[in-house]
Structure formats: structure tokens, C-alpha cells
Image (cartoon, rainbow, N blue to C red):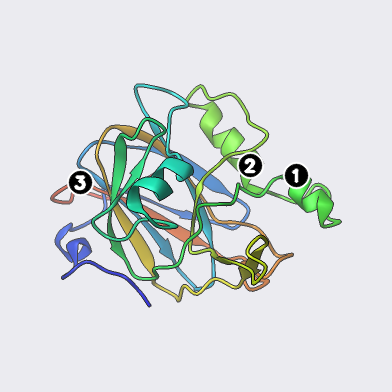
Amino acid sequence: MALQSTGSVLDSLGQAREEARVGPADARAYEVSAGEYVQIEDLQGCQVSDFLAFHRSRPGVGISTTVTRALVDGLFPVPGQCFYDGEGNALLELVEDTVGRHDTFGIACNRESYEALGVPDHVNCTDNFNRELAAYGYAPRRFWEPINFFYNTKIGPDGRIIEIEPALSKAGDYVLMRALTDLVVASSACPDDITPTNGGNPTDIMVRVYAAYGSQANSIT
């Protein structure tokens, strides 16, 4: 069942300040200031998107999926709840969510994960994040721990194995978050065409950043 706040905050924000269409072999890193909103939209449906967020003033200190799960008492926040860093500081508030199905247990797909599936050198979110975040002074990482938006995963009947099924998001579904501090963030459109995650057909996502009262749209570079 989709979860959404009463009314639509998105409708009141006006035109996006910045926006970028992110293809399934790509990712984007960008800045969001305190009070601004960031929207991640699945344009064609059944497409997942990894999301990273870090304090702009404290490079490398970002969302902790473990602390977030503990503080929201669930697998992921619902509208009105927040994403937290490892010290329990709220970074973003989840404002609207038209899907209500995400994952906070996985890591971004990487070379090793595709090698294990017999597809070496497959384009992956980790390499894309490393490239994009280098411009902000971030050293490359072997693994990134993102919020996995729109992922349809669950714990199997044995209580141990995480099972993957095609994303439940439909064309136009989105999450909308409000930044509670100045952030460096990054979004990917996952290129996984091996597992059921994207229904075998990776497509694009749209990223938009809104000022509190809207402003002229520009391209994220």
C-alpha cells in the first residue's frame, strides 16, 4: 500500500530549482541545502534508485541505515519520519511516498556483485558513485551503503535470506524529502538487468531539487 502525507506538498513547491534525468548506466551527485526538497521519481515504473546523503560540512558522515531503522522502529521511514546519521542526527525528512516499499539492508551494486553473477565488468552504481563523488573530494569506496528506493525485497520464510522481486513502483511514483541540514547527495538509476530488481529492463529516474517556494529550473551538472 502506498504511503503519502495528507495533501500534496509537491504541488505547492512550484518549478524545480534543478533537475536531471539519470539513465540506468549513470548516477548524479549534487547539493541540497537545509529546507530544500529533493524528489526521486521513477519515470517508467519498476526501476530502483540508490540514494546517498552526507553532511556537507562533515564529508563522509551520512545516513546510517542501521540507526535509521532503530529510530523509526521499522525497515524504512514513512512520511513524517526521518533518515538519520550514525550519531542520531536527522538529515532528511520523508515528506511524501507514493510507493511505500523500499530497502535499507542492501549495498549499491558493484563489480564484485556482478562478477558473482557471471557478468564481469558490468556497469554498476558503485563505480558511478565513485566517479560522481570524486568532484566533492570523496575517495572511492569498494562498497556504498545507500537507501535503496523502490526496491522490493523481503526476508524469506527461513527468516535469514533476503529475497528480491521486481520493484512495485509505477510510472510517476516518487519519494519527496526535505533536507534538514546542508547535504551532498547522490542518486543512481540502478543498471541491474540480471536479477528481478528492475524487471529485467533498467530505465531512467528523474531527480529534482526544489526551493521551499520554487524557483527557476536548471540542469544538475
Residue named by callout 1: 111
Which secondary structure, mark 3? loop
Inspect the image, locate mark 1, and give the three-letter code of the amino acid beneath it.
Arg
Q: Residues within 10 Å of mark 1 (few under 14, many from 20)?
A: some
Look at discs 1 and 3 and give the one toward the viewer.
Answer: 1
- Can residue 186 be seen by looking at this rendering? no
Q: Residue at x 71, y 66 (%)?
A: 195
Residue named by callout 2: 126
Q: Residue at x 17, y 57 (%)?
A: 13
Q: Name which of mark 1 and mark 2 comes first in the sequence.
A: 1
**Image: 101 above or below 56:** below
Q: Name which of mark 1 and mark 3 comes first in the sequence.
A: 1
Look at discs 3 and 2 and give the one toward the viewer.
Answer: 2
Q: Residue at x 82, y 52 (%)?
A: 116
Contact check, label 1 and label 2, Cβ < 8 Å: yes
Q: Residues within 10 Å of mark 2 (few under 14, many from 20)?
A: many
- Can residue 174 be seen by looking at this rendering? yes
Q: Position of residue 159 (x, y in %)?
A: 63, 64
Q: Position of residue 127 (x, y in %)?
A: 66, 40
The dot on residue 211 is 3
Inspect the image, locate mark 2, and give the three-letter code of the amino acid beneath it.
Thr
